Image (cartoon, rainbow, N blue to C red):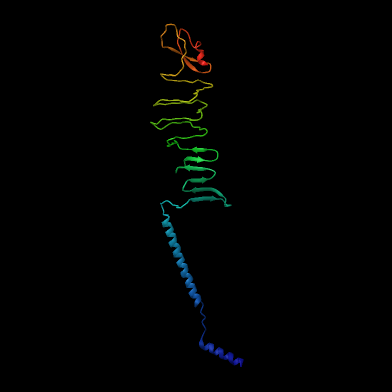
Amino acid sequence: MPQEQYAHRSAMQSSEGPQVYKVGIYGWRKRCLYFFVLLLMILILVNLAMTIWILKVMNFTIGNPLYFQSARNVTVNILNEKTKVLTRLVTGPQAVEAHSQKFEVKTTSGKLLFSADDNEVVVGAERLRVLGAEGTVFPKSIETPNVRADPFKELRLESPTRALVMEAPKGIEINAEAGSLEATCRTELRLESKDGEITLDSAKIKLPKLPQGFYSAAGSRQKIYELCVCPNGRLFLSQAGASSTCQINTSVCL
């Protein structure tokens, strides 16, 4: 019986020809695959549309600046490999703050205009102009090779509540080419030269408020005075005589 069935099956297979097996995805698997492909295409189109919209809103195009807008502030942090903040730039409604070891401002050619760190502040521009009506306030000291005002404007160096001291190892030159020079103080004005001399070079030197001595020659009405110097450095005028009259008026030096 088994031999007859085997012979019958082989006869049927030989009469039907070779059997073909189909390979592929059919049914609900095929529909799911098409659905995922369509969903992926939709996501790609939405992502592209969102990217174009963001670039358009931020005005980010080739040749145009990049704008950051915020209702409060914008903070830019520079981190190291350990996520520690090295440099921070904060722009807010009240001020712009930079937190770093050194701050520099340079031109497009690389020339240093301004730099600041813990040790010093450097201004690299050829001229520093202060446009404020009250000028510039220095609470301690300032070191500069030249201080001058704009043309047709006066230069004032003043200390309302303290002393004003100018020192230089090789001398100080005060020059007013187109105007007058005025030095005013409340208590004492001192010009001191330790190793050299003080030169007042002018066609006329006037000291209108110097005290005068009381000596006068009998019957003399001349208006010629002698400039005298007290041991403490005080100047006074003494009416000139045949010889020096400075010693007679020593009471002025008291």
Give how far across and how far down residue 252 sits, in percent: 50, 15
Q: Give the quarter of the figure containing the N terminus.
A: bottom right
User: Above or below — where is 76 with respect to 174?
Assistant: below
Between 80 and 198, the one lying in front of the other is 198
Residue drawn at (44%, 60%) of the image: 51
Give how far across and how far down residue 215 sits, in percent: 47, 10
Q: Quadrant of residue 219?
A: top left
Give how far across and how far down residue 47 sits, in percent: 45, 63
Between 223 and 67, the one lying in front of the other is 223
User: Above or below — where is 43 with respect to 250?
Assistant: below
**Residue 228 visible, this orientation:** yes
Residue drawn at (44%, 12%) of the image: 225
In screen coordinates, is 87 left or right of 178? right
Given the current orientation, which residue lies at the most extreme top position? 218
Give how far across and how far down residue 33 sits, in percent: 49, 72
Residue drawn at (51%, 89%) of the image: 15
Counting every numbered tag in the picture gives 0
User: Above or below — where is 114 with respect to 240?
Assistant: below
In screen coordinates, is 233 left or right of 56? right
Between 97 and 183, the one lying in front of the other is 183
Residue drawn at (50%, 50%) of the image: 75
Between 157 and 219, the one lying in front of the other is 219
**Residue 25 visible, this orientation:** no
